[in-house]
Amino acid sequence: MTKRTWDLVLLGGASGVGKSLAAARIAAGTGAFVVEFDDVVGAVQELTTAEQHPALHLFDDDADPDTPTRDAADALPPELVLERQIATAEALEPAVLGVVRNRLTVPVPALVEGDYLTPAVCARAVALGREAGRDVRVLFLHEGDADRITANYAAREPESGVQTARAEVSARYSHWLATEARRHALPVVDCRPWSTLPDRLDRALDGRTAG
């Protein structure tokens, strides 16, 4: 098992870049507990309505209940989908802090991974950890090539066909996350080359590189 010096890791990145695989690898090597923030997102959305919290329901398709949400989003211009995705992520920041505060009370190493972790809230989480005497680390995985993300979706979800529109938004979101992460002095790790990713993840977690 890899030597671990941290208490909590926040692993962010756009959809389809390989966060789940990276999280599983880190957890297997360190014994950390994995929290999938998507589960928290689903719970928060289930507990609220568009009237109560509009920013959490920007992708709801109530106007056409026969149209799947993802199909509805694919029909929108990518810049509008990106704008909504960022707005949703920012609206979820209090939920991220709630998870972090809870994990900081538990003496078990944990890793929180998800699309909706913004660099701004991750920087606040690092400060919360410092105040609590706990070591919180942050990593953002970056893949800015929409074609590569399309291929990742095809391998992961072959039943969904070729998801070029979704991948285009994901690539744009990845660029936004990487830019914001660097602005907050948080590590950004490029997904490729795949062969060196495990070592680069370890180095970033150890604080030996900023990506």
Image (cartoon, rainbow, N blue to C red):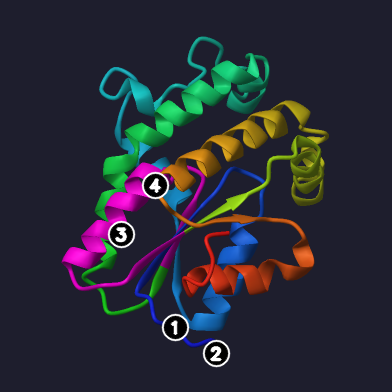
The answer to whether 48 appears left or right of 193 in the picture is left
Of callouts 2 and 3, the N-terminal one? 2
Q: Is mark 3 on a helix, strand or loop?
A: helix
Amino acid identity at mark 1? Arg
Residue bearing the label numbered 3: 126
Q: What element carries label 1?
A: loop
Amino acid identity at mark 4? His
- Which of these two is toward me, 66 or 27? 27
Question: How many neighbours does mark 1 have within 10 angstroms: few (below 14), some (14-19), or many (20 or more)?
Answer: some
Vertical arrangement, residue 137 with respect to residue 3, above or below: above
Q: Is residue 130 magenta?
A: yes
- Which of these two is toward me, 25 or 181? 181
**Which corner quadrant of the image does residue 164 belong to?**
top right
Spatial separation of the CA atoms under disc 4 and disc 3? 11 Å
Spatial separation of the CA atoms under disc 2 and disc 4? 31 Å
Q: Is residue 146 magenta?
A: no
Amino acid identity at mark 3? Val
Nearer the observer: mark 4 or 3; the answer is 4
The answer to whether 164 appears left or right of 95 in the picture is right
Residue bearing the label numbered 1: 4
Q: Give the range drawn in magenta.
A: 111-138
Residue bearing the label numbered 2: 1
